[in-house]
Amino acid sequence: MTAALTGLALVAAGCGGDDGDAADSSTSAAPATSAGSATSTTAGGTATTAGATPSSLAEWESLWASERAAIVKRIKDNHWGLSADGKTLTGPEGWTVDLTKCVAGWSDTEGLSDTSIKIGASLSLSGTYADYGNYGKGSEFLFGYYSDEGLFKDDSNGKVRKVNYIMKDDGYDTARAIPNVDELLDSEKVFAIWTLGTPATLKTYDKINQRCVPHPMAITFHSAWGDPVNHPWTTGAPSPTYSTEAILWGAFIERHLDEFPTDRKVKVAGLVQNNDFGKLYDSSFKAYVAQSAQLKDRVDYVTEAIEASAPTVTDPMTTLAAQDPDVYISMLGGTQCTQTVTEAAQNGMKGAVKYLFLGQGCVGTSAIGKDKLGGDGSAGDGWWQISNGVKDINDPAFQDDPYVKWLRDAMKAKGIDPNSSATLGLGVNLAFPVVQALAIAGQLDGGLTRTNLQLALRSIDMTPPMLLPGIRLHLNGLKDAYIVESGLFQRWDSAKQTYVRQGDIIDLDGRAKNCAWDPAASVCR
């Protein structure tokens, strides 16, 4: 499977379409290694030792402090940062930003006070994507924790600040997200800004970049966020892109092709969300099939489209079931994730379709757990998913993980019920690199500024506590614009209420090409 990906040099980033939305598939895949060690698997399939896994929060903090120090040293040793005239920001691997193109009156410190760092977010707190509001709540928790710990110290002036995290509800509606972003930029004058979903992010990231405002960890896995040249202020969430995920689906089918009858085509059915999110999935999978010598004459790919606001998936699922597919792929997010699982159990697809896949937008136990599906939960048994390796805080497999255990206890102490949504943990995973980048920026020449925050993000190389051992956070200027490019296959075990890891981690770090997104043609240039 990885050999197929290597040969493609990741067609993912070049595949057309739009993607977008959900952002951080939770991995309930139980680690296959012991608690005291970690292994990773390179794209060539070679297992390598990644070092001991910290066994307490104190050990994690010690590791992060040393990693931050190494990043600061690298930046200072290479003399990256603002030019003497303040017109250019430089960073690793040829990354530069022309600050003369920022809007008139732009300030490197807007959104900062002596005591606070104002960060804004437009998120879905209501509607069919209401659970995604927990991304924001998880992020707010982590910002609050480190604010109280005094991590955000500015060495240039000795000020210690706290994050003021402002969330606005857009209901996963681009028409509401756009004015939210405008208000956060113009009225709130935030230091940095967050957006959720590909449709909304595609409609706002040009403006955010023109305003030279940090736009970290956009909550979506679109290839377009890997564009450090034309959109230097935007970075994507820590997960493989939807394009990469679609390639992995194709590679999986190639690997299992001999399991299907040779006297007919393999029918692959996809339920595609009718927006920029689903379209990238769809076009990327089509592109992979078209170029695959094994699949192009063997696969019959059929799809049905559905609006993100549709109350049920019954009609399109019934239509797809009538096609008698061999493989079904859910290219959905929000409540439709759970609906497609229950519908497949009711219309016969669960027993008839050999492989059923949920996309990354269908978040861990929050989409397929017994409490969501009802009954004995068996409707979800055997469903597959490609995960980015995030530990699901509600999965039994991770209850003894030192960091997850600390996180759950710390949330409870703040009156947050960690059992209410696995997405809370995903919000922590999203906020972690930003927390670290804020701390790094405070140690750079000039202290905490927008440019130093962005420089810290483009230079990040750290060990995340919410990802499986062997997966790192890594951005490297123009050379590597995607912070996580590793993933793994997993399969839901309804009896154990956990995803079971299928095979090794697929490490594609540095393989995805940068993407200058062409919205008219819906392709990377």
Image: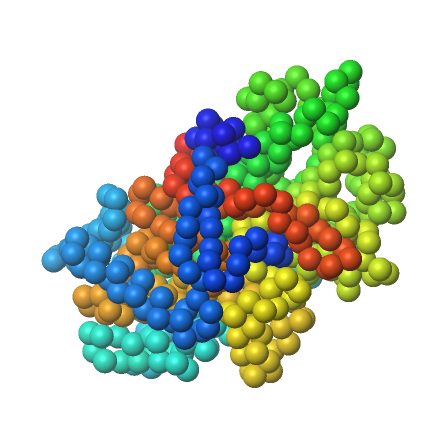
Q: Position of residue 40 (x, y in %)?
A: 46, 48
Residue 12 vs 212, above or below: the answer is: above
Q: Determine the residue positioned at 71% across, 51% down.
A: 492
Q: Position of residue 126 (x, y in %)?
A: 66, 65
Residue 212 vs residue 324: left or right?
left
Residue 324 vs residue 166: left or right?
right
* Any part of residue 117 in sight: yes
Q: Position of residue 248 (x, y in %)?
A: 57, 36
Q: Quadrant of residue 364?
A: bottom right
Q: Nearer the viewer, residue 47 or 83?
A: 47
Q: Quadrant of residue 80?
A: bottom left
Q: Nearer the viewer, residue 88 or 465?
A: 465
Q: Position of residue 135 (x, y in %)?
A: 56, 64
The residue at the far left in this view is 84
Q: Quadrant of residue 44?
A: top left
Instruction: Tell me the quarter of the image containing the C terminus.
Output: top left
Q: Nearer the viewer, residue 291 or 211?
A: 291
Residue 371 vs residue 202: left or right?
right
* Any part of residue 235 in sight: no
Q: Nearer the viewer, residue 391 or 223?
A: 391
Q: Determine the residue positioned at 79% across, 40% down.
A: 316
Residue 38 vs 294, above or below: the answer is: below
Q: Determine the residue positioned at 50% across, 50% down.
A: 239
